[in-house]
Image (spheres, coloured by chain):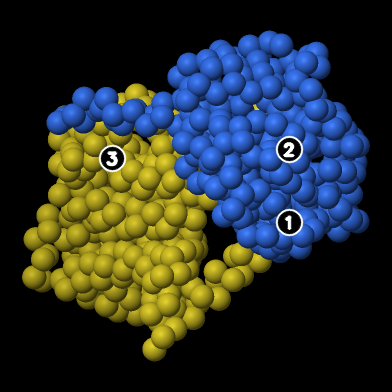
Chain colours: A blue, B yellow
């Protein structure tokens, strides 16, 4: 969709972002051993694109998502959202920022509170951001449930997570992420716990949502095939370093970096 | 909206609970004691001489054994022991449940905050909890009672509660620690929820069953501490309780003369604490499926 990097006003800009984990100081060691989760990462995400971040386990891809949501802070580097730095957001600004940036978590069995009904889960972002009143919120929830194909929304309204399948739970998680109409969504391996047919349904759902609301997605995955199916551009991350970035088809058909080649060879072949 | 959910969970838990022999025994014992406590409200209405504290049988001047008018006999001034025993059940429930409730509220709140906040808050709260935890509550109560004279029953309840929250808060804290890193907490954080909302909306429903479990054990210990305190003569002298009855037996020199006076309160203390302990054990099995499986394998 968007091929050139010269397009103005990117939604997310990362420059030189580094994240180190330091082991805790104990009585016998001072705790200097650093684990470099992300090393000097620079990325630009354009509005409306689905950007894939591909890498193996432990490559730092989830860390990047967590940094963008301000669940963790980078050791070094600047992160910008719509041109404004988000490194030091606190309090009210952070809340405003988070209403524009949402996340879909990996494990739908862990990301929904078992004690809250579907409605309560999806209502929460609306309530804490004080959007609308009781009636408009309820309507919004039902509308969002319809959007994620949990239709009719009324039927799912009062259910609890344990009454839903994995795919349905993940749809609820997606509904919770999009109910605030965010501009940017981090999807952290949203289908890795689900089987392939459900995964494709969810990909199609994400594409519909992108089209409908013009949202930007950062799609984090270890699955090149999934990235190929869904993403406009991808970046390959290895040991905390981005080894290759480019349009999906180019990266997969003509990989430049040896690691990317290795990754492509290691993928089981699928044809969607 | 969510009532059905909680009802369903309760029913499921209840089934496991009631099939458990421990739970069944505990519940039956508890119901007996509840009836005893309830009867304490009606006995004085029959005749003023059955008032456990002030009612004196005008015909009796010394401790007498069981008779038609006094099922368990009377104490040395002619008060009815059966009425006192029933009154003692009521007091034991009040002391046990009230102090357990206060310590659970305190312990759960502090534990959740400590586990969720982490860092320096956690350290301060937990060191504070440690300091209180290592104090022997009976000894502290004895010292306080001897310093300030006789305590009102509610002050005793409150002090027991204050002494007994740390163990609860430690357990709840560890639970909150593990919940804190669960994705649904992060999801709610990302949605913009405040810490207070996360603690009370997301963490609390998940630790509440555990808190109730600990409440049953707190009830047991509160009843025992109150009984010991009363027996040693530091209880509330205006309040009949089982411990106080034992204190009166001992003080009036009837330890070996009046078994009908000595034995019933002793048995009641043991059985009531036992019943709460059994309830706790059975609840433990409801909450922890690993304990349950062995039963099913048999």
| Disc assigned to residue A250 | 2
Looking at the image, is A177 positioned above or below residue B205? above
Badge 1 crowding class, 10 Å Cα cut-off, few under 14, some 14 to 19, many 20 or more, is some
Residue corresponding to mark 1: A199
Q: Is residue B25 visible?
A: no
Instruction: Give whichever of A105, A267 is nearer the camera.
Output: A267
Instruction: Give whichever of B85, A74 is nearer the camera.
Output: A74
Residue projecting furthest to the bottom: B298
At horizontal 9% and vertical 61% (from top left) the residue drawn is B253
Q: Chain of mark 2?
A: A
Q: Are marks 3 and 1 on the same chain?
A: no
Please state the total of marks drawn on the protein image. 3
Q: Are marks 3 and 1 in contact (CB under 8 Å)?
A: no
Looking at the image, is A258 positioned above or below residue B232? above
Residue corresponding to mark 3: B163
- In screen coordinates, is A188 left or right of A185? left
Q: Position of residue A66 (x, y in %)?
A: 57, 32
């Amino acid at each position: 969709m968007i091929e050139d990097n010269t397009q103005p006003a990117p939604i997310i800009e990362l420059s030189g972002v580094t994240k180190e984990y330091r082991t805790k100081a104990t009585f016998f060691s001072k705790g200097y051993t650093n684990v470099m989760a992300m090393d000097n990462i620079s990325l630009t995400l354009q509005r409306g694109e689905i950007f894939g971040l591909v890498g193996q386990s432990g490559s730092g891809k989830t860390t990047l998502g967590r940094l963008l949501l301000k669940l963790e802070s980078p050791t070094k580097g600047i992160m910008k959202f719509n041109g404004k730095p988000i490194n030091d957001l606190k309090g009210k600004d952070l809340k405003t920022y988070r209403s524009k940036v949402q996340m879909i978590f990996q494990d739908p069995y862990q990301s929904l509170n078992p004690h809250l009904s579907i409605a309560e889960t999806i209502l929460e972002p609306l309530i804490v951001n004080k959007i609308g009143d009781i009636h408009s919120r309820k309507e919004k929830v039902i509308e969002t449930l319809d959007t994620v194909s949990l239709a009719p929304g009324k039927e799912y309204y009062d259910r609890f997570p344990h009454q839903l399948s994995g795919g349905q739970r993940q749809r609820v998680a997606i509904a919770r992420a999009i109910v605030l109409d965010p501009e940017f969504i981090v999807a952290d391996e949203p289908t890795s716990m689900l089987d392939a047919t459900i995964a494709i349904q969810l990909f199609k759902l994400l594409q519909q949502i992108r089209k409908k609301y013009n949202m930007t997605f950062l799609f984090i995955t270890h699955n090149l095939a999934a990235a190929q199916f869904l993403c406009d551009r991808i970046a390959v991350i290895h040991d905390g370093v981005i080894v290759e970035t480019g349009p999906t088809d180019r990266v997969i058909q003509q990989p430049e970096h040896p690691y990317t080649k290795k990754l492509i060879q290691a993928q089981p072949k699928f044809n969607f | 909206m969510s009532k059905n959910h909680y009802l369903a969970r309760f029913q499921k838990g209840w089934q496991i609970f009631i099939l458990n022999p421990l739970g069944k025994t505990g519940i039956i014992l508890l119901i007996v004691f509840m009836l005893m406590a309830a009867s304490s409200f009606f006995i004085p209405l029959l005749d003023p001489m059955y008032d456990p504290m002030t009612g004196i049988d005008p015909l009796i001047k010394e401790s007498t054994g069981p008779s038609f008018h006094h099922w368990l006999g009377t104490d040395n001034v002619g008060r009815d022991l059966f009425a006192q025993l029933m009154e003692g059940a009521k007091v034991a429930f009040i002391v046990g449940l009230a102090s357990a409730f206060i310590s659970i509220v305190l312990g759960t709140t502090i534990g959740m905050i400590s586990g969720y906040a982490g860092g320096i808050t956690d350290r301060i709260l937990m060191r504070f909890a440690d300091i209180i935890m290592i104090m022997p509550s009976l000894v502290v109560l004895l010292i306080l009672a001897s310093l300030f004279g006789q305590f009102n029953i509610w002050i005793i309840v409150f002090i027991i509660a204050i002494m007994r929250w740390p163990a609860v808060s430690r357990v709840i804290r560890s639970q909150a620690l593990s919940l804190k890193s669960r994705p649904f907490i992060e999801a709610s954080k990302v949605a913009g929820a405040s810490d207070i909302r996360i603690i009370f909306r997301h963490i609390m429903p998940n630790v509440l069953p555990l808190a109730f479990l600990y409440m049953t054990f707190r009830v047991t210990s509160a009843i025992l501490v109150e009984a010991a305190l009363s027996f040693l003569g530091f209880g509330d002298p205006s309040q009949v309780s089982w411990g106080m009855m034992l204190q009166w037996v001992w003080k009036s020199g009837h330890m070996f003369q009046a078994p009908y006076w000595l034995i019933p309160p002793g048995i009641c203390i043991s059985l009531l604490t036992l019943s709460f302990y059994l309830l706790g054990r059975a609840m433990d099995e409801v909450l922890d499926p690993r304990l349950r499986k062995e039963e099913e394998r048999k």
